[in-house]
Amino acid sequence: MESWGLSVVCNTFIVISVSLVEEPSAPWKCVANPPPPLSYPSTSLVSTSTAVNLIISQITSSDPAVSGKALKQMEVILSSEDQRSALVPHVDQLLRAVLMQMKLNFTTQFAAASDTAGKRLTACLVSVFSQVPLASVVTQDTLVQVETDVMGYLVQRLKV
């Protein structure tokens, strides 16, 4: 004969045992030590990380207005000492998004917004590398990509 039990914990820490066998079991028993309260990750940390990810993804938007708005928001984050620390785990992602947007910026699609967007993108790159906590966590692969792309843009500008 197989049996299994179901226990329900109430707010008063009384456990009710229900069994599916004919044999009655003890219907009530008190829990001497209540379980510890559940701990959740900090909601501000989770929401900050999510917000940073959203802003970085908007930087790569093909819509110049969305990208420009995201770059303005990133400028605010980079200028605030409190918010800047939230970028540390996302620095590589941010730099690669800026580089991707720079590539989009030099297409005909962005010709009208290229001066303003180019200045904002450059300011974002300079701001990241002028802050030691952010610049020190950039990986070597991302540094090589930044160097290659930025030097390529400079050479293209000099040819024109």
Image (cartoon, rainbow, N blue to C red):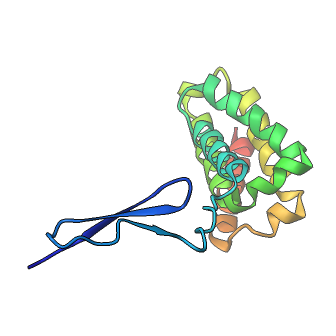
Q: Please state if 77 lies on the left or on the right of 100 as rendered.
A: right
| Nearer to me, 18 or 61 | 18
Total tally of numbered discs in the picture? 0
Residue 89, percent from left and from top: 69, 62
Vertical arrangement, residue 141 with respect to residue 65, above or below: below
Identify the image quadrant of the C terminus.
top right
Q: Quadrant of the N terminus?
A: bottom left
Location of residue 116 in the rendering, given as x and y in whole percent from the top left corner:
76, 27
Q: Is residue 136 above or below residue 102?
A: below
Q: Position of residue 77 (x, y in %)?
A: 81, 43
The furthest residue to the bottom: 1
Q: Quadrant of residue 21?
A: bottom left
* Lateral position of residue 138 relative to residue 60, left or right: right
- What's the residue at 83%, 58% (across, down)? 129
Which residue is farthest top? 112
Q: Does residue 20 appear to the left or right of 159 in the view shown?
A: left
Which quarter of the figure has residue 15?
bottom left
> Which percent across, then down, holds residue 72?
77, 32
Q: Residue at x 64, y 62 (%)?
A: 39
Which is more toward the observer, 35 or 65?
Answer: 35
Quadrant housing residue 102 = top right
Q: Residue at x 88, y 50 (%)?
A: 82
Towards the viewer: 54 or 118: 54
Q: Is residue 64 above or below residue 33?
A: above
